[in-house]
Amino acid sequence: MKYFAIIDGEQKGPFELEELADAGVRPSTYVWCKGMRDWEKAEDVADICRMFRNRIHDLMHPKSVEALHADSATSETDGKDSTTDSPTPSRYDRILEQSQMQLPSLEEIDRMEDTSHPPTPMLAWAIFATILFFPPTGIAAICFAVKSSRQWKMGNAKEAYDLARSAKMWTGITFFLGLILYAALARLL
């Protein structure tokens, strides 16, 4: 199946499935192929997602890929003259070499985040949790929420998302500590 992709703001292609990663397609890249209604992110297309997952698996488990090499090498040499000095690299060798050079690390994949829109605003939830549940940790949640909003307005998307995650965490902590406090008070009364 031939795929087209929007890379650097331009439509490029057609590409075979195996060529997509080498062409610069990442999970957040929009792709299209015959039979699709509209352009979709590569991570939402099952075949492409499976291809990326297999490449990541091969990077994380090189021994299993080496076992495939050994199996394919023995099956290729069965019935052939094994006196050749330089065997041609198998398909798995080429895929492994390409994937090691061009796939981002798992840490980079975790850091890839869609920062084109503002992070979820947590200020209202932080204030709510502070007033009704546990003010000491709620104040921390409010501070992180305000800082997140400021960082977004200054154009620091990554910092804004990091601070929004902290605000969300402290809001949750405030909520659960408040529940524990209310439960303890209910037992005393």
Image (spheres, rainbow, N blue to C red):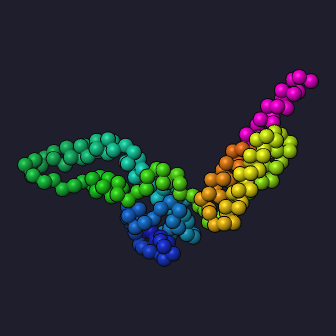
* Residue 20, horizontal then vertical, whole percent: 41, 64
| Residue 148 or residue 38, whichever sits in front | 148
Q: Main secondary structure of the magenta part?
A: helix
The residue drawn where x is 88% and y is 27% is: 186
Task: Report if residue 48 is visible in the image.
Answer: yes
**What residue span does the magenta drawing correspond to?**
172-189
The residue drawn where x is 69% and y is 45% is: 169
* Residue 40, horizontal then vertical, whole percent: 55, 65
The residue drawn where x is 26% and y is 46% is: 69
| Most distant residue in the left direction | 83
Q: Is residue 72 magenta?
A: no
User: Going by the image, does 82 lie left or right of 41?
Assistant: left
User: Going by the image, does 59 lie left or right of 120?
Assistant: left
| Most distant residue in the bottom direction | 10
Q: Quadrant of residue 37?
A: bottom right
The residue drawn where x is 81% and y is 39% is: 134
Query: Does 171 appear above or below 15?
Result: above
* Residue 97, horizontal then vertical, whole percent: 30, 55
